[in-house]
Amino acid sequence: MKELQAGIQRIQAKCIPLNRNPVSEKKPRKQGRSHPTMVKAPPQQLGEPQRPLLSFPVGSSLEVLRKRMSKGMRRLESQAERINRLSAELEVAVLELKAIASDLNRDWKAIQATQKSSTSRDICEYRAVVPQVEIKSDGSFVLQSRAVDLFQAEREAALLAQTLRHRAKQKREHRSGK
């Protein structure tokens, strides 16, 4: 006990010359809420230039951002072109698949007929879509799917055949009418 009192006295002796409250004499806290104190910033002089809020030079960082943006846009455009090129290649490959399936389909149906199958389905179903990148008017890019019309060639061939038959018929009628 005497040692503790001696220790307290030594601490008090050290704290009082330093203008501190000794441990044993804490001030009681006020009950209630304490509000933060507002500190006003010193007013700027009129002739004094304003300092930027950022810690780095704004001009140079904007230039770096512009260069990075320009480089990134070139990479983005290049990648969009690559996707569209691959999409066109994929469309050709899908059309080749359809041509192969059409050739096999005759044999497939013949085999099904010999097996007395109740369903006569095609060897391949077509639900083809390929990716495509479009650039909107605001410069943003849109990755979307584009449907591949696998039967366009057949429709065009049928339309051409119909047109040629119609022309041939008109020529015959014109010749017989003279």
Image: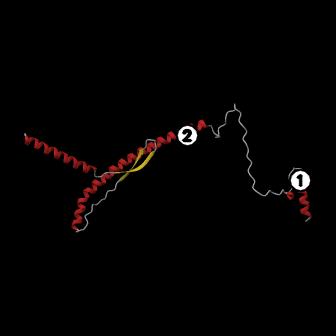
Distance of mark 1 from mark 2, alpha carbons?
58 Å
Q: What residue type is labelled 1?
A: Lys
Q: What residue type is labelled 2?
A: Leu
In this view, 173 is above or below 117 = above
In this view, 32 is above or below 63 = below
Q: Position of residue 65 (x, y in %)?
A: 55, 40
Give the colour scheme of this rendering.
secondary structure
Q: Position of residue 64 (x, y in %)?
A: 56, 38
Which residue is situated farthest in the top direction here? 47
Left or right relative to 57: residue 152: left
| Residue 56 figure quarter | top right
Q: Name the residue under label 2.
A: 65
- Which label sits on residue 14? 1
| Residue that appears at 33% across and 52% down | 94
| Residue that appears at 48% across and 41% down | 73
Mark 1 or 2, nearer chain start: 1
| Residue that appears at 36% across and 50% down | 90
Q: Which of 154 and 44 is in front in this view?
A: 44
